[in-house]
Amino acid sequence: MGFINKLINKVRGNDSPAGSHDFANGALVIGRDQHAISRRDISDSALKVLYRLKDAGYQAYLVGGGVRDLLLGGQPKDFDIATNAHPEQVHKLFRNSILIGRRFRLVHVRFGREIIEVATFRANHTSDNSDNQARQAASGMLTRDNVYGTVDEDALRRDFTINAMYYNIDGFTIHDFANGLHDIQNRTIRMIGDPYERYREDPVRMLRAIRFAAKLDFDIATETGDPIDDLGHLLEPIPAARMFEEVLKLFLAGQGEATYELLQDYNLFRYLFPQTQAAIDADQTENQLVETFVIRALRNSDERISHGKSVTPAFLLAALLWHPLQSRVAKIRNMPPVPALHQAAQDIIQEQIKSTSIPRRCSTPMKEIWDMQLRLPRRHGNRGEQLLDNKRFRAGYDFLLIREAAGEPLDGLGEWWTRFQYASEGQRLEMSKELGKAPRPKRKRKPGKSAAQDDSSSSGQQA
Ligand code: ATP
Ligand code: MG
């Protein structure tokens, strides 16, 4: 951080008090030799987009997380570009691009797996904007934000000061419109403008404040954090699909545990996972089994990410909804365990998608991970071997270990599976034998039903 200190002193002059420069009339401009961002740090695709826009006569800046993370010495997750070219004009420049969004129209330029997001400068709304450009709900929420403007207007429409720094490809200068450098130096998340109003315009900014605070290990400025408790409920009407995207960013970016803690501090977790919050609130166990499990699962994802391993939304969602699922199962009467689990899974997912959508590519593996939890205790005979070949074995087993670590009484089941996997064939036989004879549930067969119709029968014998 010493570098930025030096930088700010250099730019302002040592005797100017912090924050005294006037940015309303324009930006603090930091020359190319005064900052550490070089073109080498920027992806080739982003550079291509920046240069093509510039060569076509438009202004083009790298903005947002790209600039912020590079100034912090980190590796940006993606590169966002801001320009005075309108979306249609950008689209025309790039064959490999598509126009997306209605609330916020922008262009995605695709290079293989990398997507560069190009947004046109936005301005404040005025009374003579058309309905398609600007639309605001009674709550203050902007349901259309497509009024175009200039770079300085654009800066003040961004969320946090640290996200409103612009790297100009024409001259390689950084333009700081909202004192973002100062807040980077002080490790502070600070909303631009009046926080109440800005949260009302877009309540997802509350989640973003928390996401950046956890990701960067920054503090949320008091005036930026204070309104959140009052305004959390504004998240309720946000479309479930947008909430799902946000949940992935919150929990699957490597700082899930810290993010969870902050969400609880600011009372927002309940709007993402109401059923999980209810299970946490109702938890009477001595060591807070429900919350311990949630935290363990998030920590596990964080560790996997830090070791470069993959994490899936399905696993995370299965974990977040595991205890609500258990309560639900407990309420179902007169049904065998497997169908009861399936029924409960259906109910829990139906309820969750009121808050965050769950695409089928997630709900299917989620159910399979839950299903595995019923199968893993049933290891007699050659079932153990068979389960190892199941495509969800790995996820199911990892899930089991977290349950065990969180304190669920499972009688050493996780440890058994750990040994079983690494055992030789002979040892496996021995381990299965040690379990004793498989307890055979007595089945009453309905008269007239043949064994062939009953797929639960493994022996094919008539009772
Ligand atoms: P990261 O990509 O690392 O998650 P980011 O800051 O780049 O962080 P994006 O979601 O990629 O976040 O958005 C890019 C930029 O667009 C932000 O830095 C911010 O300037 C602006 N922005 C994004 N979402 C909002 C919003 N809801 N309200 C105001 N500005 C926003
Ligand atoms: Mg970004």
Image (cartoon, rainbow, N blue to C red):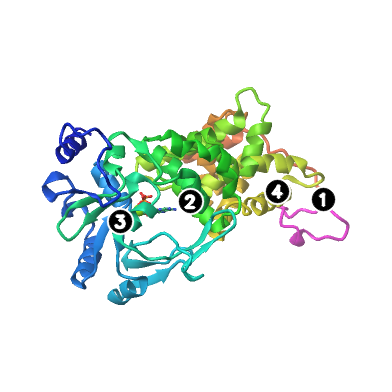
Residue occupying the point 53% across, 59% down: 361
- The answer for how far apart the CA atoms under marks 2 and 1 are is 54 Å
- The answer for how far apart the CA atoms under marks 4 and 3 are is 52 Å
* Among numbered discs 4 and 1, the one appearing first in the sequence: 4
Residue occupying the point 48% across, 51% down: 246
Q: Which mark, by number, is residue 246?
A: 2
Name the spot of residue 206 as percent of width and height, x first.
Answer: 49, 44
Name the spot of residue 300 as percent of width and height, x first.
Answer: 46, 37
Categorize mark 4 by other alpha carbons within 10 Å: few (<14), some (14-19), many (20+).
Answer: many
Categorize mark 2 by other alpha carbons within 10 Å: few (<14), some (14-19), many (20+).
Answer: some
- Amino acid type at circle 4 is Ala
Q: In this rendering, would 421 be left or right of 90? A: right
Highlighted magenta segment, given as a residue range: 444-463
Q: Nearer the viewer, mark 4 or mark 2?
A: 2
Give the residue pinned by disc 4.
Answer: 344
- The answer for how far apart the CA atoms under marks 4 and 2 are is 26 Å
Q: Nearer the viewer, mark 2 or mark 3?
A: 3
Would you say residue 292 is visible in this rendering? yes
**Main SS type for the magenta part?**
loop
Element at label 4: helix
Q: Is residue 336 above or below residue 171?
A: above
Q: Nearer the viewer, mark 2 or mark 1?
A: 2
Q: Quadrant of residue 409?
A: top right
User: In the image shown, does 28 or 329 lie closer to the viewer?
Assistant: 28
Element at label 1: loop
Asked whether the beta carbons under mark 2 and mark 1 sit within 8 Å of each other, the answer is: no
